[in-house]
Image: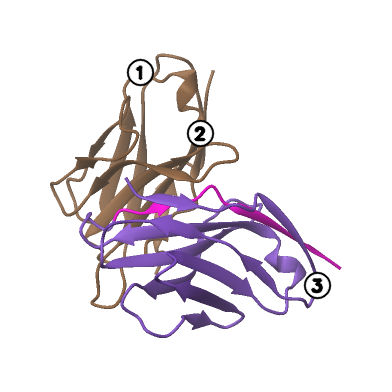
Amino acid sequence: NAGVTQTPKFRVLKTGQSMTLLCAQDMNHEYMYWYRQDPGMGLRLIHYSVGEGTTAKGEVPDGYNVSRLKKQNFLLGLESAAPSQTSVYFCASSSWDGLTDTQYFGPGTRLTVL
Amino acid sequence: AQKITQTQPGMFVQEKEAVTLDCTYDTSDQSYGLFWYKQPSSGEMIFLIYQGSYDEQNATEGRYSLNFQKARKSANLVISASQLGDSAMYFCAMSPRSNDYKLSFGAGTTVTVRA
């Protein structure tokens, strides 16, 4: 049982390049989320999904796109990377089990845009 | 948007002593969840404890307890018998049930445990 995994762990991009971050969960969770964490700050929600084939915007969605073609996977895309997108990206998943909706996080991806 | 406030940027605590981390929140929802996460220097987000808004008893998980005061909208984390491994950043978060279970996070409190 791996929980939530993220690929890659580190990435360096040049301004204008594109990339996709992959999140996978093996807990059969309905909900999946992408957050970014900037130095000295809490996490901010980028996009999320309430089920396979659905996506929705979070607090800071500009410059990102997402897709959830399979229940266990949630992809975050940067079409044209900017230095302001240098951050640590976390994926999380959850389901409401009648008692709690605890989100479990992946290990994070550290992205640097030069 | 939900607002989570953690007023203590950093705290020092002596090993084996207890420490309380403050968290207040603002929401108009009646049904919500409160969470605390630990982020050590290695960077991962570790779930510590959960409290539901309708739970009458304060949540406890080992050395962690959540002091929930609903009327004051506060959800303080108490770590008892601090250990060196407790040195980390701690985040308070809230999830309203009416909002797709999205989490809003506070800015965090850094705890340093001294030997």
Which amino acid type is marked by label 1? Answer: Ser
Task: Name above or below for residue A52 compared with residue B62.
Answer: above
**What chain does mark 3 sit on?**
B
Q: What residue does disc 2 label?
A: A87
Which amino acid type is marked by label 3? Answer: Glu
Q: In the image, residue A6 lies at what x, y percent? A: 42, 48
Q: What residue does disc 1 label?
A: A80
Nearer to us: label 3 or label 2: 3
**Residue B15: mark:** 3
**Chain letter for the purple colouring in the rendering:** B
A81 relative position to B77: left or right: left
Q: In the image, residue A14 lies at what x, y percent? A: 48, 16
Secondary structure at numbered mark 3? loop
What is chain A's hue in the picture? brown
Q: Which residues are drawn in magenta?
A: B102-115
Residue B50 included in the magenta stretch of the image: no
Which amino acid type is marked by label 2? Answer: Ser
Secondary structure at numbered mark 2? strand
Q: CA distance from mark 3 to mark 2?
A: 33 Å
A25 relative position to A105: left or right: left
**What chain does mark 2 sit on?**
A
Nearer to us: label 1 or label 3: 3
